Amino acid sequence: MDKTEKLKLVKNTIKSYDNFPTYGVNFRDIFPVFQNTLALKALRDLLVEHVLFLEIDLIAGLDSRGFLLGPMVCIEIDKPFIPIRKKGKLPGKVLSQDYSLEYGESTLELQMSSVKEGTRVLIIDDLLATGGSIGAAINLLTAANVKVVECLVVIELVELKAREKFNVPIYSIVQF
């Protein structure tokens, strides 16, 4: 299967739910991709092919779907994975960042012991919508004196223009 066929398969496997989790939100669900092994392999290939030649030291995955995507890529490229989690889920000293998301407010945290100054990091998540969680992750890693090389997402909601908010490259597998 070539890249175009993989992209089409992944995009066509993603489901949309109107007015979820709140009225006015069109939720894009990647879980059907995980239920279709052919689509999941295609997604894995697309992610790995993109990051293979990036100069990174590790991948940081955002709570929670980034936890599914990040390790899948890390195993293929032989790089470590670190989680950026919702408030109160990480032990030890953490950095915290509040943010707004498409349908509410939240806080993300980074375990301070998980990165060293100067580390080159790729952030991975399932979705770029308003940019709240990606922005919080960039801020957390920047506060830890880490270089964010790129943010990689499966889905980008282009009409929300979130990528314009950042000075970090954004790469999306599919766009809606």
Image: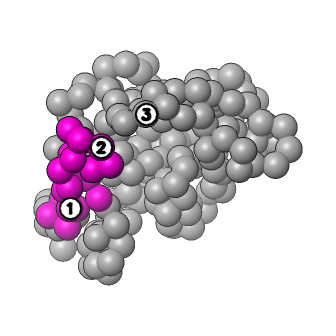
* Foreground of the two, 8 or 105: 105
Q: CA distance from mark 1 to mark 3?
A: 22 Å
Q: CA distance from mark 2 to mark 1?
A: 16 Å
Q: Residue at x 34, y 67 (%)?
A: 31
Q: Residue at x 71, y 50 (%)?
A: 89
Q: Which residue is labeled 1 in the image?
A: 15
Q: Kindly state the secondary structure of the residue where label 2 is placed.
A: loop
**Label placed on residue 104:** 3
The image quarter containing residue 164 is top left
Q: Which residue is labeled 2 in the image?
A: 22
Question: On the rendered image, what quadrant is the C terminus found in?
Answer: top left
Q: Residue at x 24, y 28 (%)?
A: 160
Left or right relative to 90: residue 71: left
Q: CA distance from mark 3 to mark 2?
A: 10 Å
Q: Are marks 3 and 2 in contact (CB under 8 Å)?
A: no
> Mark 3 is on which residue type?
Gly
Q: Is residue 170 above or below residue 84?
A: above
Is 137 contained in the magenta span?
no
Left or right relative to 147: residue 145: right
Instruction: Identify the magenta region.
Output: 11-29
Residue 6 image position (x, y, % from top left) = 20, 65
* Foreground of the two, 147 or 15: 15
Answer yes or no: is residue 65 visible: yes
> Mark 1 is on which residue type?
Lys
Q: Is residue 137 above or below residue 76?
A: above
Question: Crowdedness of circle 1 by 10 Å Cα count: few (<14), some, many (20+)?
Answer: few
Question: On the rendered image, what quadrant is the N terminus found in?
Answer: bottom left
